[in-house]
Amino acid sequence: MNLQTQKDTLEVGRKLVGFCRSNQVVKAIETLYADDVQSREAMDSPGMPSESHGIENALKKNKQWEETMEIHSAQVDGPFPLGDRFAVHFKYDATDKSTNKSWQMEEVGIYTVQNGKIVKEEFFYTM
Amino acid sequence: MNLQTQKDTLEVGRKLVGFCRSNQVVKAIETLYADDVQSREAMDSPGMPSESHGIENALKKNKQWEETMEIHSAQVDGPFPLGDRFAVHFKYDATDKSTNKSWQMEEVGIYTVQNGKIVKEEFFYTM
């Protein structure tokens, strides 16, 4: 167990959670993500495979999410570190704009940090 | 993305969460864990390194936890699957029996499933 690694990871995690809580996800991606960040999602979504690469794809995913969902409230718990990774638990109260269906959505994100940047994001959820 | 793998993983996750919610962690370990399960914790604890192997160690960790902490209430969110892993978010309202100190504890567990058994558990948290 490298405690310094875990401390550095936690610092990046705190910044990410701060941005998410203040609804600044684009700024989080631009500031904290490595250029070639890997993304994994539990599900494919329209026009977006479950595995993708790069900041542009991360921004595109976020844009698609914002265009699809109206978020009424969000709860962001974390960061919870383990070595060079940290976990964040998200709960959303949202409405799908196209169907007007209400959702109580939850997911866990696991982020991997190298040299102060997020190099991998993995999202765990069900539909 | 192998959807069958994710479905099998989710099934094991549902059983684990069910056992945790009904306070049957020993039964969860005995029923769902592979004999040589790998364990990773964010921190070392007395007499227990952050990395260990085997069902006996998993049971020992759980016993140590139960001897140390009095749990007043627990919230278990999940399982949230991604491929052959699933995430669970735990929140505990607990008292440390030795110091009588109250804790609001949170952690995320990531579990890896192979052939219907949990082969790895990883716990993300801060103290």
Image: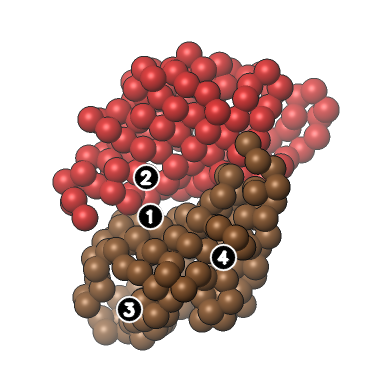
Chain colours: A red, B brown
- Is A120 above or below relative to B27? above
C-alpha gap between disc 4 and disc 3 = 32 Å
Say which residue appears at 44% left-offset and 61% top-offset. B121
Residue B96 numbered mark, or none: 3
Mark 1–mark 2 CB contact (< 8 Å) = yes
Q: Residues within 10 Å of mark 3 (few under 14, many from 20)?
A: some
Check chain identity for marks 1 and 2: say if they share one: no
The spot of residue B80 in percent (x, y) is 60, 50
Residue B124 numbered mark, or none: 1
Q: Amino acid at mark 4?
A: Lys
Q: Nearer the viewer, residue B65 or B31?
A: B31
Which tag, 4 or 3, sits closer to the chain's start? 3
Say which residue appears at 22% left-offset and 40% top-offset. A8
Name the mark nearer the viewer: 4 or 3.
4
Q: Amino acid at mark 3?
A: Asp
Say which residue appears at 56% left-offset and 50% top-offset. B84
Which tag, 1 or 4, sits closer to the chain's start? 4
Mark 1: which secondary structure?
Answer: strand
C-alpha gap between disc 2 and disc 3 = 25 Å
Report the residue marked by disc 2: A86
Report the residue marked by disc 4: B117
